[in-house]
Image (cartoon, coloured by chain):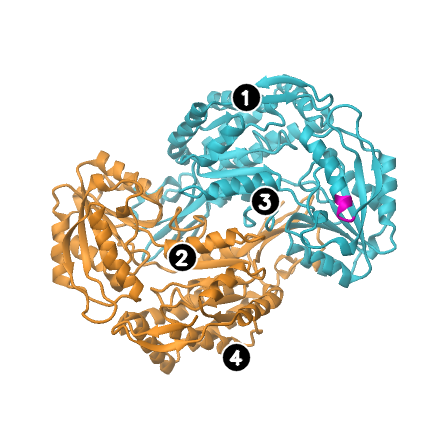
Chain colours: A orange, B cyan
Amino acid sequence: MTDISYDARTGEAVEELTASTVSEVDEALAMAAAVAPAMAATPPATRRTWLSAIAAALEVPETVDELVALADRETGLGEERLRMELGRTPVQLRYYADVAVEGSYVDVTVDAGPPRLARMRVPLGPVAVFGASNFPFLFSVLGTDTGSALAAGCPVVVKAHPAHPALSARLGRLAVAALASAGAPAGVFALVSGFDAGTRLVGSPHTAAVAFTGSQRGGLALWRLANERDVVIPVFAEMGTVNPVVVTPAAVSSSLATGFVESFTRGTGQYCTKPGLLFAPAGSGMAAKVAEALRTLAPSAWLLTSQIAAAAVDGVGELVSAGGEVAGQVAGPETGWAAPATVLSVPIEKLTSGSRLLEECFGPVAIVTEYADRAELETALDQLQGTLAAAVMAGDADPDVPWLVERLSTLAGRVTVNDWPTGVAVSWAQHHGGPWPSTTNPATTSVGAAALTRFTRPVAYQNVPDEALPPALRESNPWRLPRREMS
Amino acid sequence: MTDISYDARTGEAVEELTASTVSEVDEALAMAAAVAPAMAATPPATRRTWLSAIAAALEVPETVDELVALADRETGLGEERLRMELGRTPVQLRYYADVAVEGSYVDVTVDAGPPRLARMRVPLGPVAVFGASNFPFLFSVLGTDTGSALAAGCPVVVKAHPAHPALSARLGRLAVAALASAGAPAGVFALVSGFDAGTRLVGSPHTAAVAFTGSQRGGLALWRLANERDVVIPVFAEMGTVNPVVVTPAAVSSSLATGFVESFTRGTGQYCTKPGLLFAPAGSGMAAKVAEALRTLAPSAWLLTSQIAAAAVDGVGELVSAGGEVAGQVAGPETGWAAPATVLSVPIEKLTSGSRLLEECFGPVAIVTEYADRAELETALDQLQGTLAAAVMAGDADPDVPWLVERLSTLAGRVTVNDWPTGVAVSWAQHHGGPWPSTTNPATTSVGAAALTRFTRPVAYQNVPDEALPPALRESNPWRLPRREMS
């Protein structure tokens, strides 16, 4: 099976990419497994030079032009957005390298004893990365999962994304060359391609963990596959959800409608943090205001693949069947992979647990509903699935904010107030995760400093002489990691 | 189905305990779910008073006598051991309460922004606890899982262990009374009993996590059950493994054989950290030395249940079928639940991945094998499953220690040098966990300060006004938690 590179704007097949053979996949995994112990013993500062080399390669002006053009052809996301996204990618790689050097994620803890116990987090070993379609730079071949896994000391084997296979191949070659030039040993990074390569990666005894960003269907399929292994491995899947927004009575305004449209149509609605369901006070006329903003802003752009475009069109039909009514719609482009931007109005009593209305519709589609009072709103919130993010749009000193923040925090991994949830800062306090089924592991984040922790496990060393301890735990502390010493 | 309380020494049924009805289980869960938000908002210092009340109730002299007698009847572990174990139980409860008050497990992190992000770990909600048969105090109703979950702010519903149902019921009543006297709201703790109650606990939408200590069969059954839920929840199962010990050429001595026998027959061999497989240098005659020590020490005591006794007897037969040879054996008691203490000798080439020889045999049974050289030892180590602990017995400045510690750290959650792995300190640097299948989640520990973390998940609050933040994140920091502030 080969991957075909399409032009999203025309739907034409431009390039055919050969899938990796089974023996190519196995070789990549064997090399990753072989280098894993040496990589785990490599000082974080050395790993930083490796990540810096990849980062620098992504900043060479001609390379930037080439990558943006390739990404734009395959994704149709537009040069401006892609240039910005590519620009943030080396920043993110360097950030993870800095987090590794800072070293608090290693969680070094020493008990004076008896018994003398010293604990650290050690890298898990080879990580299989399945990137996302919607962020071809920040969440794909050289994105957050690859960056945080390499920073944490784990070799990475990436499965090329079929939505941007030519870009994936190009980024894979770039990384291999940059790592070699920085003196990283072979096996630290590899790219494989084709559907079968993905299955092989998850099943291989060499693979120690899987990181995935994408749909619930895709993420849960990998999770099930990993659970059938003899030695089960963790699957860190970050998946699509509705990301509800609650507008309080004090917050109603038409600029809010504009902000909502900008947020849910950003990247043609292809964000895992897209606000897909807005709760507005009864009588606010929010659905009509959003429909008007949609007509005014007239967002119209391509979707990432023919399947995504078809699913977005079908999704609107499914939402209508489930009780939604189209309140406003702007046609998509006439060629290529297109779907109309759509806002639907739904009576709140239709929002019942298990309804299609409470599942993500990937693409420029959102739902507006109205609540009569707090009791009705709370009943509806009780129906929602776990979600990556949730937002409150409120007035000044708004009495509804405290209870809403508390209530939404039980559903979501991140709660925002008067901020649309779409943007995800790469920082120390970030948590880009959330309760099932927004992720397969609500304790972990795929963005931010804590992303490294996923790819480690603690080991305690009891009564081990100093010279036999890993460098991170020795008295001389050659990696200069912060440590907690308990007497 | 009822639980029957047996006398381990005679095998007689002493008492019949009524299993919880479905509605009793559901009510316990509903109450736990109802109190969960208030419990999450309770300051850790208040939760400490609750745990202290349970701890104090476990120290009332008449209660101690009563509990030890009850435990001894049901487990046959002997008064001395049980008095010591019970004595450590309130210490462990107070330790977890202190860890909660110290508060670094909440991992409060604040980015100045923009965007301003504040992150903390919030309690998951009701935890279903399945305790172990082998530690009726430290790993059962009021053991490490219950203590760390309550300390972390999660209500607990314990399933009574069928190996000590009368003791479980008594401990359950004690905890309920102590919590009430300390002013804890109803629902914070409940005990249910009977096999069906366990299934109901794992399937309930109110349950947020499961903690289990016991056999691989039991732990994996709960894990599979939880994975079939609509909303999958984490199962933290800590399970039995072989815990290999490597004796280096420099370490061979007969006191080592004595130490090994004491360790593998401790608690009648019913420790999850029992060293079940010892690698000795070729020609050391270690199997004969261990057999001699076994005859000299003549350990003979009861097992916890008729099933465990039968499995220990059958297990020796299985190990013989798989290539082991009985090198020494001491008969168990003549009445009640007994099995002989046994050491087997096995040619190292029989230790192949998937062999019964590499699986735990619960009870006073261990294997000794000999390795000719490092290459042969490494080949054998490559066959082993993930394990909770692994030990190196070495000489002074022994050149084999560094590579053995590194190699064993890839297999185990804890590596000891010149310490038998049996004891598990409750401390900050402890890690009582390990790679699959020793646990279902190698990133977590069931003992030590980090045990609280299992029952939490991070939430990031973006641009949330101070008065709407949870207390732990407010500027005034009323819980006085350590926080990391990034500008």
Q: In the rendered structure, find residue B428 and report the number of the disc placed on it.
A: 3
Secondary structure at badge 1 equals helix
How far apart are labels 1 and 3 at the CA level?
Answer: 28 Å
| Left or right side of B18 for A392 | left
Q: Which residues are magenta?
A: B319-323
Q: Nearer the viewer, mark 2 or mark 3?
A: 2
Q: Nearer the viewer, residue A126 or A421?
A: A126
Number of residues whose C-alpha sits closer than 10 Å to that of mark 2, classed few (under 14), some (14–19) or many (20 or more): some
> Mark 2 = which residue?
A218
Query: Type of residue at label 2?
Result: Gly
Q: Nearer the viewer, residue B447 or A273?
A: A273
Secondary structure at badge 2 equals helix
Asked whether disc 2 touches disc 3, contact meaning CB atoms under 8 Å apart, the reply is: no
Query: Type of residue at label 4?
Result: Ser
Secondary structure at badge 3 equals loop
Q: Nearer the viewer, mark 3 or mark 4?
A: 4
Asked whether disc 1 touches disc 2, contact meaning CB atoms under 8 Å apart, the reply is: no
> Mark 1 = which residue?
B174
Number of residues whose C-alpha sits closer than 10 Å to that of mark 4, classed few (under 14), some (14–19) or many (20 or more): few
- Residue drawn at x 15%, y 47% is A252
